[in-house]
Image (cartoon, rainbow, N blue to C red):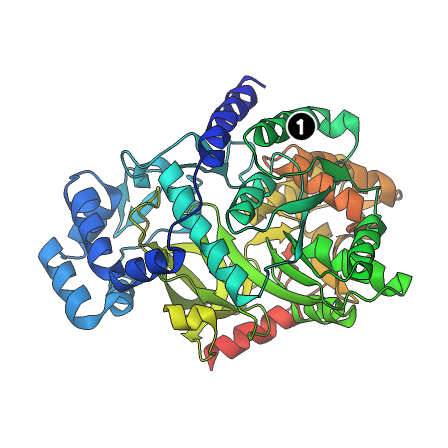
Amino acid sequence: MLKEAVYYTRMARGLFDILRLPPPADPRGRLRDQIEHRVERFAAQVRDYVFATPDHPYRIMFEQAGCQYGDFENSVRSGGLEATLRQLRDSGVYLLHAELKGKRPIVRHGREIPGNGDSFLKRGNGGHWTSRSGGSRSAGTSTPHSTAYRAYRNCYEAVLAEEFGLAGRECILLFPILPAPYAFTTARALQHVELPVSRWFAVGGNMRDTGHYRVVTRALVAEAKLLGTAIPWPEYLPSNDFTPVVRHLEKVSARGRKSVVWGIVSPTVRVAAAAIEMGVSLAGVIFLTGGEALTEAKRELIEQSGAEVHPNYFISEMGTVGYGCSRMRGNCVHVFEDNVAVIAVEREAPLSGAPVQSLHFTTLLPLNPRLLINVEMDDHGVVGPASCDCVLSRLGYRTQVDGIFSFSKLTGYGATLVGSDILRVLERGLPQRFGGSPADYQLVEAESEGLGKLVLRVSPRTGAKDAAAVREFFLKEVRALFGGSLTVREWRHGDALAVVLEEPEITRAGKVLSLHLLGEGARQHAKAGRR
């Protein structure tokens, strides 16, 4: 409780700093300048933060690879950045997702390298605003953001407003309340490009579970209003009911205006499904979504309602990876090459055995609070050239990542839970409570008519008779994970979890996987990545 109080006090101070930022001057020029100078500025950071620090984890990896700074600089200049990063990856200069999270030691060539997530923070680049990624019962990975960094990131919204023709549209947020901070930063960035937010629809849970989050959320909204930010009070949606959003979109359309909705993928899908059931056309509505994979089924359902949908790709530890443009299809984005470089390495997914193209990220922006080189975030994607003629391509974002999905994290409804944390609940908590073995419980990601669902399969061998009791116990255990309270709140509201007393699914190889993350669509992407 004390840590939470300190965190939100710090957030209030950080919000004060962010809300006082002026609109970005010449956002296109600033982004283009960083794109053009990304290589030399990154090389300077490697020199100043890595090679100038003898005990830096990356310095040790470079030494093990037999690479001095001069070698690195020459390789980048002569062979290119991405080619150099691939050579470094093959030589052992990389970081696994679990190593960045501090869940396993960093080991290269049989030697343990001291370090954790904080080892990669840049000295002097922090601020009062801190984002936290999901973790288990720890505090997750905290990343402090300076006001200068936030100001730079506001340039992205200016470019997106031009790409999607957002001028004159009514802006609506479909974000959860705290501990997720998206609504506050999005509202301020949109106001900078003259797109004030008119409504904020949120899943708030009940007062017993989320009362303290509602209180802090209200306090921060009050602070934002006092500082002149157009952020509305959150309007809490009734349980499993997205019709209020549809009714508002319908009223906006009746007034002759168009809407743009910023939100998480699953809730936007639920809005589209509700509109279809109500017989309301969402023609003219644009959904800009993120937080989880925008699968083809989800996209088709949203488009069936008459709306457009475009994804974004954001990772807490490194910021915005990219946005899809108005011409892209699928779960595809332009890589924001001013901020990150991306390479893909083929490997076997740990929870399925399926071949995937594992994305490795390197942070390039000098203002980014972390210097990360070849960090694997357990996401699949196919990297290639972006061939579309759009605002983002013309600005210089000419690389795309397609078919993005996570192969070891459970994402959805704006929350991320690490697969290994969920496995502990499946393989220890449930057998201890209801009997059976770890092989008798399986959590399966599924889609039904475009709606994301989770199915907890429980073998009849366990002797469990009450599916509702199993469901409540599982939700209780998930809620105890860091980030779990937000996850459970969203799962309950969207009725996203079902428990069936049936045998777990068996793979074609005859395996029973406790956490079945890769569906058929994801497997098809994985196969495409091999061709």
* Residue under the point 70% across and 66% down: 298
Above or below, 353 relative to 212: below
Task: State the residue position of label 1.
Answer: 218
Relative depth, front residue between 30 and 468: 30
228 left or right, relative to 375: right
Residue projecting furthest to the bottom: 531
Q: Tell me residue 81's x, y (percent).
A: 25, 65
Residue 154 shows up from this direction: yes
Relative depth, front residue between 409 and 366: 366
Relative depth, front residue between 433 and 157: 157
SS at circle 1: helix
Q: Tell me residue 456's x, y (percent).
A: 75, 51
Residue projecting furthest to the top: 2
- The quadrant of the image that shows the N terminus is top right
Relative depth, front residue between 109 and 448: 448
Quarter-of-image position of residue 175: top right
* Residue under the point 38% across and 60% down: 28
Crowd rating for badge 1 (residues with CA inside 10 Å; few <14, some 14–19, many 20+): some
Q: Which amino acid is tagged 1?
A: Arg
